[in-house]
Amino acid sequence: MIEQTVITLILVLSRIGSFLVAAPVYGGGFAPRMVKIGLVFALAVMWMGSGTVEPVNQDSTAVIGWLGLGIATVRECVLGATIGYCFGLLLEPARIAGAYIGQEMGLTLATVVDPGQNTSSNVFGQLLETIAILLCLGADTHLIVLVGLHMTFELWPCGSPLPHLPLLEIVHDTSAIHQWGLLIAAPVGICTFLTLIILALTMKTSPQLNLFSVGFSVRLAAGLVAMFVLIPVCLHAIMRVLLQADVIIERMVF
């Protein structure tokens, strides 16, 4: 009985831990390591104490061995990381939209370190990503993802064979995040693109006007004004992306 409980706890911790590492809101650099470790153990104790997690079969426990336990642990890590990666697809369009807007405004060199992924991104990318995270928490999207993770323990018990993962749907959603990102950045991007066309026509009619000395300031000012005026449209587009959480989790679980 103790052996079954210990093996089940290891498998549960592997699935939850890999999920928290891959999920952008729970994992990444936003939370300290001790907080993430405590959250992993808290979720594992909650699900095991509530009877949601079924203990590993006694017959399989007797013959599982170290090799079988390692294979089962890798299987649980793959399943948890896949669910966390699908959750990360909901926040990636906001980061792509911010990177595109920053590039159009001439802020390519103004990069800062992203604490979530330890990579460089511009200020608008971090701004829209932070707004997307706040909207995700406000719309309880993170709870929907936890419900999906909870259902995996009922449909695919620990130690069971790896389920058929919807790889084609995951690839399709991965390719669609660029389209979602462009839809979020479209209002501001159109304004900056029209500003660039107007500056090019002005420089054509007035050659003494230096595009490099005046154009960057004008594009930056036009982008800031457009971002301030059209931010409700961008927020609505981000919310439409976050509402796809139930669809993505349904594809994963069912």
Image (cartoon, rainbow, N blue to C red):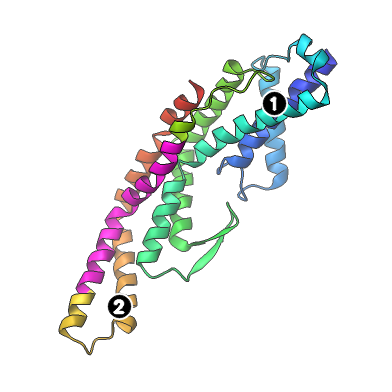
Residue drawn where x is 42% and y is 59% of the image: 99
Q: Residue 119 — which label?
A: none
Spatial separation of the CA atoms under disc 2 and disc 1: 56 Å
Q: Is residue 86 left or right of residue 213?
A: right
Local crowd at mark 1 within 10 Å, few (<14), some, or many (≥20)? many
Q: Is residue 146 left or right of residue 232?
A: right
Q: Residue furthest left?
A: 205
Give coordinates of residue 45: x percent, y percent: 71, 25
Determine which quarter of the picture holds residue 186.
bottom left
- Quadrant holding the N terminus: top right
Does residue 58 sit above or below 117 in this rendering? above
- The mark that comes first in sequence, 2 or 1, is 1
Secondary structure, magenta segment, majority class: helix
The amino acid pointed to by label 1 is Val
Magenta region, residue range: 171-198
Residue drawn where x is 51% and y is 23% of the image: 253
Q: Residue furthest top?
A: 59
Give coordinates of residue 212: x percent, y percent: 33, 81
Give coordinates of residue 128: x percent, y percent: 43, 53
Looking at the rendered structure, the secondary structure element under dot 2 is: helix
Looking at the rendered structure, the secondary structure element under dot 1 is: helix
Residue drawn where x is 37% and y is 60% of the image: 101
Q: Residue 12 — which label?
A: 1
Q: Is residue 111 left or right of residue 48?
A: left
Residue drawn where x is 73% and y is 15% of the image: 56
Q: Which residue is mark 2?
A: 215
Can residue 241 be found in the magenta stretch?
no
Q: Is residue 226 visible?
A: yes
Q: Nearer the viewer, residue 188 or 171?
A: 171
Local crowd at mark 2 within 10 Å, few (<14), some, or many (≥20)? some
